[in-house]
Image: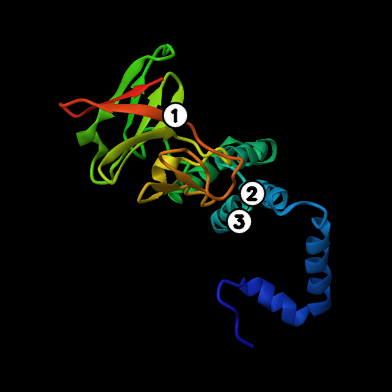
Amino acid sequence: MGKAKGESRGLAYLQQVRPQAVSHLLRFFRESGQHLEPRTRFLISIVTKVINLSPRGLQQYVRRALDEGASPDEIIDAVLCAYPCAGLTKVVDALDVILDMKLPGFEAPGEGDDSTAAEGPVAKGEWVEVGTREELGEDERLEVNVADRSLAVFEADGEIFVIDGLCPHRSGPLVRGQLQGKTVTCPLHQWQFDLESGACQDNPGARVGTYEVRVEDDGRILVKF
């Protein structure tokens, strides 16, 4: 009897020599979480994979948790919840595994897109420089932090647009989303937003903030707050 791709040799062996025992065990696992929503089950599985330090299992359940709507912060919390049983070394190693997956929202400090920071409070109606056309680069986008506010700057069809940088669904980083015309798609759960109005095409009740933009002759991009 052949082994399915990715199947454990040990499990395949037990299914042959102890089929009844394995059947009871697998049924127990299925029924033990039947009253939990999928996102919660997968977050719990992340905790167990950190305790056992199973990189392949951790990668599997991180992806499944994200697919079910878990946010990066919830996944990090699940990893930290394993600390009492796993210890600091396994927690840190688990985070290394997740960072190596290169998923949106899990960039280590210094990684990802360049970010411009404007510190200090910003008054209403104030114009703030957030970058230059040159800094947008080939991707035609720039991630900016202004007074602890995340913004995403895009160039689309020759125009400059500035919107809130985080998706209102699960805080997906919109600057890393797919840009098509004047629509950006969140990289986490594919919600689409119009750069002009901020309206969400998938959920009429959701939107992101938009900002008035002024581009100076020297290419500097200013945003009105």
- Tag 2–tag 1 contact (CB < 8 Å): no
- Tag 3–tag 2 contact (CB < 8 Å): no
Secondary-structure class at tag 1: strand
User: Label 2 to label 1, Cα distance in Å?
Assistant: 28 Å
Secondary-structure class at tag 2: helix
The residue where tag 1 is placed is 150
Relative to 164, residue 3 above or below: below
Secondary-structure class at tag 3: helix
The image position of residue 29, as x and y in percent, is 78, 61
- The answer to which of marks 2 and 1 sits earlier in the sequence is 2
Q: How would you rate the neighbour count of disc 3 (Cα within 10 Å): few for under 14, some for 14-19, many for 20 or more?
A: some
- The answer to which of marks 1 and 3 sits earlier in the sequence is 3
At label 1, the amino acid type is Ser
The residue where tag 2 is placed is 46
Q: Nearer the viewer, residue 4 or 203?
A: 203
Q: Residue at x 42, y 47 (%)?
A: 184
At label 2, the amino acid type is Ile
The image position of residue 10, as x and y in percent, is 66, 72
Q: How would you rate the neighbour count of disc 1 (Cα within 10 Å): few for under 14, some for 14-19, many for 20 or more?
A: some
| Residue 35 seen in the figure | yes
Q: Which mark is residue 64?
A: 3
Relative to 111, residue 126 above or below: above
User: The N terminus lies in which quarter of the figure?
Assistant: bottom right
Q: Residue at x 61, y 72 (%)?
A: 7
Relative to 126, residue 71 above or below: below
At label 3, the amino acid type is Arg
The image position of residue 18, as x and y in percent, is 79, 77
- The answer to which of marks 3 and 2 sits earlier in the sequence is 2
Q: Which mark is residue 179?
A: none
User: The C terminus lies in which quarter of the figure?
Assistant: top left
